Image: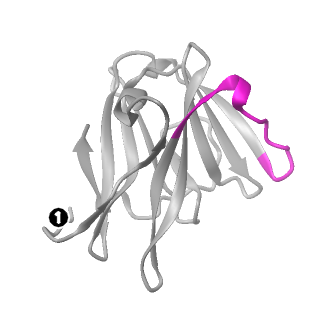
Amino acid sequence: MNEPSSSSTYLGFGFAGLSSLHEEICRPFTEMTVTLDRVRTPTELVLWRKDDTGLKIRSKMHDLAEKVEVGILQFATTTRTNEIEPDGYWETAERFSAKVFDGPNSISKLVVDESGYSCESGILVTSISGKELVVVADVFPCHIAVLGIEGLSSASKPEYGMARYRRIDW
C-alpha cells in the first residue's frame, strides 16, 4: 500500500446536503439505481432509503499536474420526486435491491495517493452480513466504477488498481 507523504495535499469528497456526509452515508439503504451511459459505463449511483430519500454519487475530475488527473467522489442528497428519468437513448437506469444493506453498515473511505495529493476517490460499504459495495472513480473521466452489485452488466473499470487505494475506516 502506498503511504501518503507528510507534505501531500488532501482532496476530500464533495458534498451537497443539509446534514453531514458521514451521517448520510451511514444511513441504511434498500435499493440502488445505477445510471449508465450508451457504452454501459456508470455515471451515477443513488442509494435509496425506505423514506424515498437517497444519496447520489458521481465523480468529478481534478487536474493534479500536467496530464495527471484523478476522480474525486461527489455526493448529494436527493428524493425520488426530484429525480429525472434517463432518456433511454443517451442514458439508461438499472434498479437493484439492496435489502442486505438495510441495517448497520460499516463505511470506509478509499484514498489514492497521486503526484503529492491524497484523494478521496472511493467508498467501501460493508453490510453486517459481510456483503461489500465498492464505488470508486472510473478510468473514464466523470464516471464511476461500481463493484459488488450482482446482475449489473457494465463496462466500468476503476481508475486505479484496487491495491493502490488506502482504506480508512470512517
Q: Which residues are magenta?
A: 76-91
Q: At which x and y percent is residue 144?
A: 55, 53
Secondary structure at badge 1 equals: loop
143 in relation to 98, above or below:
below
What amino acid does circle 1 point to?
A: Glu
**Quadrant hosting residue 140:** bottom right
Q: At which x and y percent is residue 73?
A: 46, 51
Residue ID at (58%, 60%) = 142
| Residue found at the far bottom of this picture | 66
Say if the magenta span includes residue 87. yes
> Residue beneath label 1, please?
3
Say if the magenta span includes residue 153. no
Residue 165 can be seen, yes or no:
yes
Residue ID at (20%, 61%) = 1
Q: At which x and y percent is residue 166?
A: 25, 54
**Quadrant hosting residue 116:** bottom left
119 in relation to 23, above or below:
below
